[in-house]
Image: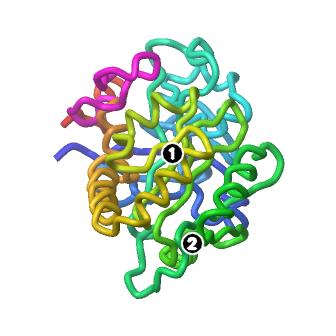
Amino acid sequence: MPKPLKLLITYNYGEEPILKLLCAKMLEDAFRRREDVQVFHTGEIESADADVVFNTLPLGDACSGRFTVWWDIEACSYHKTDYFGSDIVLAPYSCGDDYVYPGGKTFLFPFATDPNHWVRDPEVVEVYDAGFVGREDRNRCKRVDYLNYLGQYVNLLRTDQIERGVPVSRLLSSAKILIQVSGDAAGGVMETRFFECGLIGPMAADMTATNRRDMEWAAEPDYHFIAFEGKEEMVEKIQRMLADDKARQLMFKRAQANYLRRHTYDVRAREFLETIGFLKGPGLPDFHTHGEASSLWKSLYSMSPTVSAV
């Protein structure tokens, strides 16, 4: 058996009590569930002794090591280009011109879901036609407009300030269809909600010029989720699905299978390990092509005697 990979996590946990269930925290939990990875926080191990240094936001004591990674999770608001010199860069979605990210070492690494925290509660009665939990301030004018329009036609659950994870899952379990409308930032990227809430109920999500390629990579429109581009199409498709319980339940069943097979943080962790060459496998998709998944196949064994590709 090869020795475990030593993974140093540097992001800042000071914001966790406010944000709850940070995406980076759920990814860390996935790494911790693996027997072949040892996870350390800043201060628990020197960066020079780690096999991989993983940096992302909320930004803590970011540093470099034998092999350095940057996950650019706030790309829709600003790119942290000063970290693009890392050995590899992980992009959560397509955002702006592709040339922003360095070629040859940037991989698509979207958000994901965790069935330990996000799940439909079968004991909750469905009292709403549709449900949305999320922010409607600042650069979310399109979202407000679409939700206002939808609320004229269906019984809509619409709120915010609900703790992420189980509390949101229980609340949204009272809605027959969950709603995703992108914010205005960067033209409407593929959002965290599309992944996290996917295990709670069937979803209707907007397709934009910015997110289309990512969304079609993640799931099949109108097979795994209700896809719409305009307000009228949104209402028409949602009303049609509300009138057909069998079709709605079948779509949700397909979506659940897709999320569990491809879009959990356990899957993301494994694909990351494949990409850096610690495990054998196809790895993450190359960001600039979104074609067949490709791998750096950098042999960490050559960098550290504690790591061996398996």
Residue 195 drawn at (x, y percent): 46, 52
The kind of residue tagged 2 is Val
On the rendered structure, is 22 left or right of 160? left
Q: Earlier in the sequence, mark 2 or mark 1?
A: 1
On the rendered structure, is 175 left or right of 263? right
Image quarter of residue 161: bottom right
Q: Is 308 colored magenta in this rendering?
A: no
- Residue 297 visible? The answer is no
Which residue is denoted by mark 2 in the rendering?
Answer: 168
Secondary structure category for the residue under label 1 = strand
The quarter of the rendered structure image containing the C terminus is top left
C-alpha distance separating marks 2 and 1: 31 Å
- Residue 289 visible? The answer is yes
Secondary structure category for the residue under label 2 = helix
Residue 56 drawn at (x, y percent): 61, 41
On the rendered structure, is 100 left or right of 51? right
Q: Residue at x 64, y 26 (%)?
A: 83
Which residue is denoted by mark 1 in the rendering?
Answer: 8
Secondary structure mostly taken by the magenta-highlighted segment of the chain: loop
Residue at the far right in the pictured view: 138
Crowdedness near tag 2: few (<14), some (14–19) or many (≥20) residues, C-alpha within 10 Å? many
Residue 61 drawn at (x, y percent): 69, 43
Q: Bounds of the magenta span?
A: 276-296
Number of numbered discs: 2
Work out whether 30 lies above or below 174. above
